Amino acid sequence: MKTMKNSILTILLFFFSLTIFSENKLAIVSSPEGFIFILSGPGNEYKIVDTLYIDDFFYFQFVDNSEWAKVTAWKGRQIEGYIHISRIQEVEKLDKQKQKELITKILDRQKVLGDNFQSDWKSKDSLAYRTTRRDLEYYSETKYDPILEILPKYFCLTNDVEILNHFFATMWADRGSANENPSSALGRCFSCNPNLVIEQLTKVKNIEQKKMIIDHIEWGLLNNFNVSENGKSDNKEFIKLKTQLDNVKK
């Protein structure tokens, strides 16, 4: 699992470098051709750096007094360049149905890859294990992690329990991962509507799965509220949420 942990650390550092700048927004390509070239500068005369396809995520920042935006994408390596603003569809500005479809599509695929990884690991098929691990890592980096930034915002606005339960199932399929982004996302879902999350959590029949979800929520709360290593905090909101979660454990 060392390779997976190193890969996750790299992608976490990449996304952290983006999120410290609030002007960077998550987006997908808006193009009738289904793709767009990333250029080395803000204009069609610049050379092509790479290509973004319709399902690729990227982050963008508008260039002052220009019709171009600076973009950063992750495709197993960091890619930077420029695209025209007419080709940008900010994910948060999609209508709620399209956001749900996008989130569902990515959770579906992540769950399948997670299930395949678990199956190949148990079968001790080393070749299949390496292949599915590589596929899972790449998809986590390029699709799953980015959509986890949007999922809590979507859930907090819609109270969509279907998406929440889908997220539970995906996390269970992906159990054992060292990725902390799912914990952070689930912690944010819990923070905005703890009663609804607890209600759905009580419906989880698998005791091990239920415990795993609770652990993820707890870890997410600790991270999201920047709680010290000893787990103590004077933040009243954190104390309230932690108490509610502790009551579920009993």
Image (cartoon, rainbow, N blue to C red):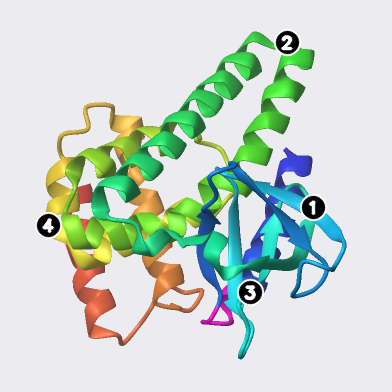
Count residues near mark 2 (Cα–Cα under 10 Å), then give few for <14, some for 14-19, many for 20+.
Answer: few
Count residues near mark 1 (Cα–Cα under 10 Å), then give few for <14, some for 14-19, many for 20+.
Answer: some
Can the viewer see residue 184 in this picture? no
N-terminal-most mark, 2 or 3: 3
- The residue type indicated by label 2 comes to Asp
Specify the label residue 69 is tagged with: 3
Quick check: 183 above or below 63? above
Residues at circles 2 and 3 in contact by the CB criterion of under 8 Å: no
Q: Is 206 inside the magenta-drawn segment?
A: no
Q: Quadrant of residue 205?
A: top left
Residue 30 lies, in percent from the top left, at 51, 53
Is 34 placed left or right of 10 in the picture? left
Read off the residue under disc 2.
Answer: 125
N-terminal-most mark, 2 or 1: 1
Chain part drawn in magenta: 19-23
Q: CA distance from mark 2 to mark 4?
A: 43 Å
- The residue type indicated by label 3 comes to Ala
Q: Secondary structure at mark 1?
A: strand
Read off the residue under disc 4.
Answer: 195
* Residue in the picture at 59% in, 66% down: 59
Count residues near mark 4 (Cα–Cα under 10 Å), then give few for <14, some for 14-19, many for 20+.
Answer: some
User: 1 or 189: nearer the eye?
Assistant: 189
Q: Secondary structure at mark 4?
A: helix
